[in-house]
Amino acid sequence: MITSVLVANRGEIACRVFRTCRELGIRTVAVHSDADGSALHARVADTAVRLPGAAPADTYLRGDLIVKAAVAAGADAVHPGYGFLSENAGFARAVLDAGLVWIGPPPDAIEAMASKTRAKRLMGLKPLTGVTEADLPVLVKAAAGGGGRGMRVVRHLADLDDALAAARAEAASAFGDGEVFVEPYVENGRHVEVQILADTHGTVWPLGTRDCSLQRRHQKVVEEAPAPGLSEELREELSALAVRAARAVDYVGAGTVEFLVADGRAHFLEMNTRLQVEHPVTEAVFGLDLVAEQIRVAEGHALESTPPRARGHAVEARLYAEDPSRDWSPQTGRLHRLALPEGIRLDTGYTDGDDIGVHYDPLLAKAVAHAPTRTEAVRKLASALERAVIHGPVTNRDLLVRSLRHPEFTAARMDTGFYDRHLPDLTEPSPDPHAPLAAALADARGRSRFGGWRNVPSQPQSKRYAMAGEEHEVHYRHTRTGLEADGVRVVHADAHLVVLEVDGVRRRFEVACYGPRVYVNSTALTALPRFPDPTTQHAPGSLLAPMPGTVVRVADGVTAGAPVKAGDPLLWLEAMKMQHKITALVTGTLSELCVVPGQQVEPGMLLAVVTEA
């Protein structure tokens, strides 16, 4: 019997596993890097063990340190979560060799399936070699790991070498394995997967399908179960292929077999020998706790001969600290508040007041809605996200709401090219035009406890805010009866709530301030000083860091004085386990290169200057 579990992971998945362990009466052990010393997963565990350092390669990818931590903390089992070492057969063997229980598949099964190249050979498929123009487009893909890291779509043969180099570097950083391969890129297919659960007694459960077609950078954003619009014949074929893959390697535990579905045909992608990020939608539909089932299987218990019956529909949306309108750039900073309405499952690794750093994935939380029908589940989740309180770094919340309400998604006609087609429309700013006035009125009430009206009429007060990249100036006036503003009636105003009547309609604005940052309902603003301070001026053609991160590579031949063309890659930044390409904005001469590989940069830091020809 398992009595204490160490989770070899961090953030949301560690907290999620700990929740089930507490319900089962199992003690919990966390591991944390120096950057995660005060992280939620380290705080909620019964015991926490430090892994010195911050980079994944020095901490969460160090299997030897994690095994030592488990032994030192008195754990008798290790759960790998997902990512990091979850699909590392060597780590699984090290756990077993230390006399601990491994809550995962046998190392041989991991070895057979964790490498996508070996998995394809096992399923009778081969990677693409000797790529020619006729093979394009192709996908460069990391052999290990997942989450969209180490992936590049190549549409021009001249770009292949750069894509291979970038994918290798990203995969090595994220997974400790730089092996990549090339396969044909299926345009506009649907990403469909089958959840499986197998025990040590020969039973394999296929637990329905999931659709994960809404993706950015090959990383899933919205997932649902069951996958809508599939014929019964195709569902049965997908389940049979998934069971076949599991039995081929004597699989044990939870796993996922992934496919691309196009023109009614299923194309095998890979088998993930671990729990998936999107497992909650399967749990909701089947009424299961997959982590609890993993633990029971690891203890040797047998599954029932048939799985439980599926009920209803579930949809999950991943809330990321990122700006979709700026090439999905990750965001950092203090998360002041995160709250969703009741009735929505929220899996998160953060709580109010936590800091979001640069070292790890920008996933903040997963929101899951379950309802009797797909239409009801989608509507429920979209409404909950729209009403969610999220005060902190920029997130993809608005993108999620619009995605869930897009006609293609509501009609279940989506595919993996959804964001390629619709991103500009989905990220078009739509701030509330009355938010600056509500912020100004709340500020006026917060500052003036005794009222500010005078017997002599005075000039209107003014306040300036930055909102959605633009400056807004609003005006209001103190009177005997309260505050007045042109065009609207101020029904109520205090430091936290403003009620305005606009064209006969009353609207409520909840206001929260954190220094100059102001949140009015779901709109973020920045209060601007009345007399702006002088700011540093940058020369035309300056390239500034769009995010905090590390310079990992400078393009070949890029030195001061070199000629460059608009669009040429100059350097790459790594932030939150993804690499971001910085390109020249104009054609001219690289007059300054201000950074070197390995250097840490902050947002707005000068990277290079290109003098236009």
Image (spheres, rainbow, N blue to C red):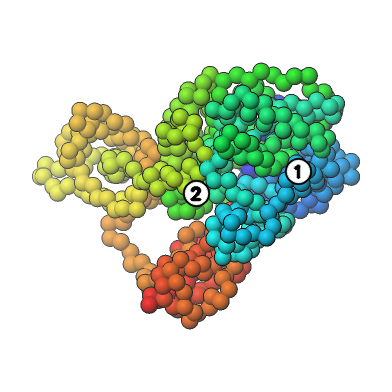
Q: Nearer the viewer, mark 2 or mark 1?
A: 1
- Give above or below for 126 relative to 247: below
Query: What residue occupies the far left of the structure in this picture?
Result: 456
Q: Is residue 506 visible?
A: yes
For label 2, the residue is 322
> For the point 48% across and 23% down, which residue is it?
376
**Dot 2: element:** strand
**Dot 1: element:** loop
Q: Horizontal placement of 527 versus 323: left or right?
A: left
Image coordinates of residue 9 in percent, x first then y, are 70, 44
Q: How many marks?
A: 2
Q: How far is disc 2 from disc 1 in space, using C-alphas?
A: 39 Å
In this orientation, which residue lies closer to the viewer: 125 or 253?
A: 125
Q: Amino acid at mark 2?
A: Glu
Query: What residue occupies the far bottom of the structure in this picture?
Result: 561
Residue 124's disc number: 1
Q: Which image quadrant: the C terminus?
A: bottom left
For marks 2 and 1, the one nearer the N-term is 1
In this orientation, which residue lies closer to the viewer: 325 or 524?
A: 325
Q: Amino acid at mark 1?
A: Gly
In this orientation, which residue lies closer to the viewer: 489 or 565?
A: 565
Q: Which image quadrant: the N terminus?
A: top right
> For the point 33% across and 49% down, which residue is it?
467
Image coordinates of residue 564 in percent, x first then y, are 46, 74
> For the point 61% across and 32% down, which residue is it?
210
